[in-house]
Image (cartoon, helix red, strand yellow):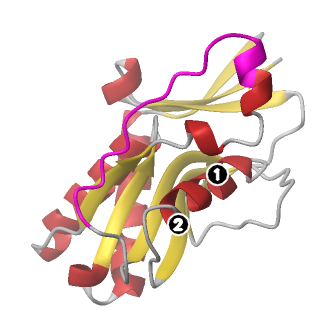
Amino acid sequence: MARRKILDRRGVDACMDRLARDILLNCGDLERLAIIGIRRRGVPIADRVAAKIKEIDGRSPKTGALDITLYRDDLTLVAASGQPVVSKTEIPFPVQGLRVILCDDVLFTGRTVRAAMDALLALGRPSKIELAVMVDRGFRELPIEANYIAEKISTTSEEVVKVHLSEVDGEDYIEIVTK
């Protein structure tokens, strides 16, 4: 397997800053905004983006964590190869009527985002759902696009984009791994 680092810690931090500024530019009312991370790496992204927004604007949007395990369309495949790990959804506020920005690390097929929208809608009806991602790598299988993209990367089907975050992986960087 060949590995190629495309962004280091400073590059990842610049991506978080870019997402926060783009969201601030387009969001308007922070009181009606929630930034919700899709477990696993979407959660620290949501937290960091919210912290950057507070740094820039002085106000914090609501934040939360969404587990999509039971909403995946490949759950039977995951269950066949072992027990799926269900984590906790932690959204300490009603989503009804809020503008919700879902955060994830890599947008690829769109299936994770579809599952996240299903999981979110099971909790209430937001006024709007948007998507913020660190990396859009293409190869969509569903008609889903991100509203906020930190990096757009051209890849091949033999490549995997991996976002490493200190909260999960011990350090921040993004790499492309060739199978």
**Which quarter of the rendered picture does the C terminus lie within?**
top right
SS at circle 1: helix
Q: How many marks?
A: 2
Identify the amino acid type marked 2.
Answer: Leu
Residue 161 image point, x, y percent: 68, 34
Question: Camera-side residue: 87 or 151?
Answer: 87
- Which region of the structure is painted magenta? 78-93
Write the residue at 34% across / 18% down.
170
Tell me: 152 left or right of 44.
right
Question: Looking at the picture, does residue 115 appear above or below residue 40?
Answer: below
The type of residue carrying mark 1 is Ala
- Quadrant hosting residue 2: top right
Residue 8: where, in percent of width, then height? 45, 33
Is-magenta flag for residue 79? yes
The residue lying at 35 percent from left, 63 percent from top is 35
Q: Can residue 97 be seen in this view?
A: yes
Apparent side of residue 49 relative to residue 22 in the rendered image (left or right): left
Mark 1, other Cα within 10 Å: few <14 / some 14–19 / many ≥20 = some
Residue 51 covered by magenta stretch: no
User: Percent position (x, y) of residue 176?
Assistant: 69, 29
Quadrant placement of the N terminus: top right
In the displayed structure, would residue 18 be above or below residue 6? below
Indicate the position of residue 175 as horizontal and vertical percent values.
Answer: 61, 29
- Disc 2 target residue: 121
81 to 159, vertically: above or below:
above
In the depicted view, which residue is nearer to us: 170 or 66?
66
Instruction: Give left or right: position of 91 versus 69.
Output: left
